Amino acid sequence: MANHDVPFDGYPFDIQACPSPAYVVDDALLRRNLERLGQVQAESGAKILLALKGFAMWDTFPLIREYLVGTTASGQDEARLGAETFGGEVHVYSPAFTAPEMDVVLRYADHLSFNSPGQWRRFRDTVAAAPRRVSCGLRVNPEHSTGEVALYDPCAPGSRLGTRAANLSPGDLDGLEGLHFHTLCEQNSDALEATLAAFEARFGQYLERMRWVNFGGGHHITRADYDVARLVRLIRDFKARYPHLEVYLEPGEAIALNTGFLVCSVLDIIDDEIPNVILDTSATAHMPDVLEMPYRPEIIGGGLPGDKAHTYRLGGTTCLAGDVIGDYAFDAPLAIGDRLVFTDMAHYTMVKTTTFNGIRLPAICRVDETTRAVRTVRTFGYVDYMQRLS
């Protein structure tokens, strides 16, 4: 693997070689994640899928499919994208399908998870009549919360995601071949261990009749402190108890964690108690999890307020008063035209962008893992904004 730490003026790639703003994915960092995920597959016997809801930069799929077995989709368009640009297995889940959407999904899906017995009853004849065989399952709710952010907790009281054990009736699982749970968000394998115990306590009685179990996403496998050995042990022990079951994991974030950057430029500096810096990017339009989660993204060369000589409040170009990324300190004063680089901007960025206020989407770039050259994959303009609206 190429040395991705070689700096270009203090950065891991030439930040002047891409448009501004731009998402930049580093192939060397992406491969590093994929090698760890490949190791988990080899040692545990589980299959790992790319969750397109988290990362769908299909220009990188030839690299990703060297390691992973397929994709998991949240509906008809992701299913088609996975089938046409990635290949391999295509898994699909949605809280509810329409009849026209189901007709499309059945062209591409290999596995299909329903959210409720009612949806399975509605579509089971449609699935049976499909020209290709589709293995169907049910998403279940283990009712065991391990996360800290309620917005991302599928096991919160009253959750619409997954079927509770108490709501299963005799015959609801007839014809189904798998169970699917998804409860984690950016968590370590200890959270999976606790969730798996709750899942088996509530749904273990049904596992003998199944062919597969999907452990969902939220596994932060490629984070530095993630306990990979525990994950492998959990999966191997589970497969020892149920040797007839295929086990799937579908992390979206772990694939692209710490592989991407958002390069942006300083447009204006407004003097105040804390000087306001206006960037050519936006929290609400280009990195919405900053406001939704919320969290404070890191900047290369930036520190906490007061930790360095010059502190600024960084904000975007939309009219939203709260379009503020955060307060950052720098060794040298910022100037109009300076470029800043936010880190960990690959997952849940490109897939969640908007054109609010008519702000243009960032370009998409890749850094070659050997030459370190920056290639612009795609830029966006007026037509991309206009065609969304009529």
Image: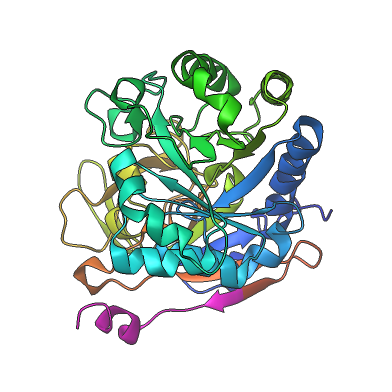
Kindly identify the residue that appears in the image at 81 percent across and 64 percent down. Answer: 370
Please say if 143 is above or below 36.
above
Residue sitting at the far bottom: 383
Please say if 203 is above or below 365.
above
Residue 379 position, x and y percent, is 47, 79
Visible in this render: residue 110?
Answer: yes
Visible in this render: residue 154?
Answer: no
Residue 96 position, x and y percent, is 30, 51
Residue 381 lies in the magenta-colored region: yes
Nearer to me, 144 or 4: 144
Residue 223 position, x and y percent, is 62, 33
Query: Is 72 placed left or right of 116 in the picture?
Result: right
Nearer to me, 353 or 115: 115
Residue 373 lies in the magenta-colored region: no
Nearer to me, 297 or 311: 297
The image's colouring method is rainbow
Instruction: Locate residue 269: give its quadrant.
Output: bottom left
Query: Is 79 placed left or right of 133 in the picture?
Result: left
Q: What segment is highlighted magenta in the picture?
A: 376-390
Kindly identify the residue that appears in the image at 64 percent across and 35 percent down. Answer: 247
Instruction: Say which quadrant the C terminus sits in.
Output: bottom left
Nearer to me, 277 or 155: 155
Kindly identify the residue that appears in the image at 48 percent across and 66 percent down. Answer: 130
Residue 291 position, x and y percent, is 28, 43
Please say if 42 is above or below 90.
above
Count the labels in the image.
Answer: 0
